[in-house]
Amino acid sequence: MQAKSTTILGIDTSTTIGSIGLLVNQEPIAEHTLDITQNHSSRLMPAIKTVLEWGNLNIRDIDAFAVAIGPGSFTGIRIAVATAKSICYAIKKPILAISTLEAIAYNLQYVNKLICPILDARRDQVYTAIFQGGRDLIRQTEDLCIPLTEILNRLDNIGKNPVVFAGNGLQRYSEDIHKRLNKPILASPAFHVPRGINIAHLGAERFQSDNIDDYLSITPNYVRSGPP
């Protein structure tokens, strides 16, 4: 079956680096990355406007909006989800909820190894999941909020093959990972960020199969309750 023509806007503000990506017929058209540690709520809509201008598009030209729903920064997730829901409600467009951890793993999808994104969740815990890379990215676990030792135990039980790690949690936990696992591979910082264009790609895959979400009921995926 031939893929239908699609224009997808990907939105992510679930970590300290926000990103907006524009995908037209599976081709990246524009991407805007911004530091959202300050004034992120006021900078998101201007960033979306900028990306649309770069693509010579109007917001109504977008077929669907893909948004990272977490886990990650509680405040950042809320802002992105609320913004995407408001836009989709106003112009009656589909919305696609994307895991932040899956978007990070997507950076490394063609690596034929286990991929383990790790975000620092504080309280001596991490947001994490396990994926199998290769021709397709295959999820092995749900999104989790657990102590690092627990995810390392799971990986250790899977086997002794090298695992690729990515995400901002490596800033704190890289030494612990090296001590525990056999020859872990720590990705370059360039692969630690859930890029907006990856959010759009993952959204496009779901849009092609008509696997869309309800913008009235979509909620952030905090994984755990309460602020980090």
Image (cartoon, rainbow, N blue to C red):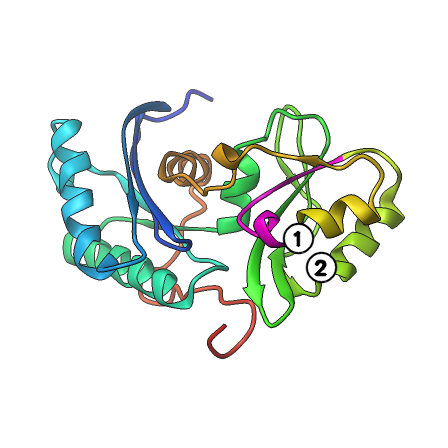
Q: Are marks 1 and 2 in contact (CB under 8 Å)?
A: yes
Whether residue 224 is visible: yes
Whole-Å distance between the Cαs marked 1 and 2? 8 Å
**Which residue position is annotated with label 2?**
148
Q: Dot 1 lies on which element? A: helix
Report the amino acid beneath label 1: Tyr
**Residue 30 disc label:** none
Q: Position of residue 192 (x, y in %)?
A: 51, 41
Q: Position of residue 121 (x, y in %)?
A: 56, 64
Quarter of the view holding residue 143: bottom right
Q: Is residue 61 above or below residue 69?
A: above
Q: Which residue occupies 49% across, 67% down?
A: 222
- The crowding category of the residue bearing disc 2, from other C-alpha atoms within 10 Å (few below 14, some 14 to 19, many at least 20), is some
Q: Is residue 203 above or below residue 7?
A: below
Marked residue nearer the N-terminal end (1 or 2):
2
**Residue 173 disc label:** 1
Q: Residue furthest bottom?
A: 226
Report the amino acid beneath label 2: Leu
Q: Position of residue 96 (x, y in %)?
A: 39, 49
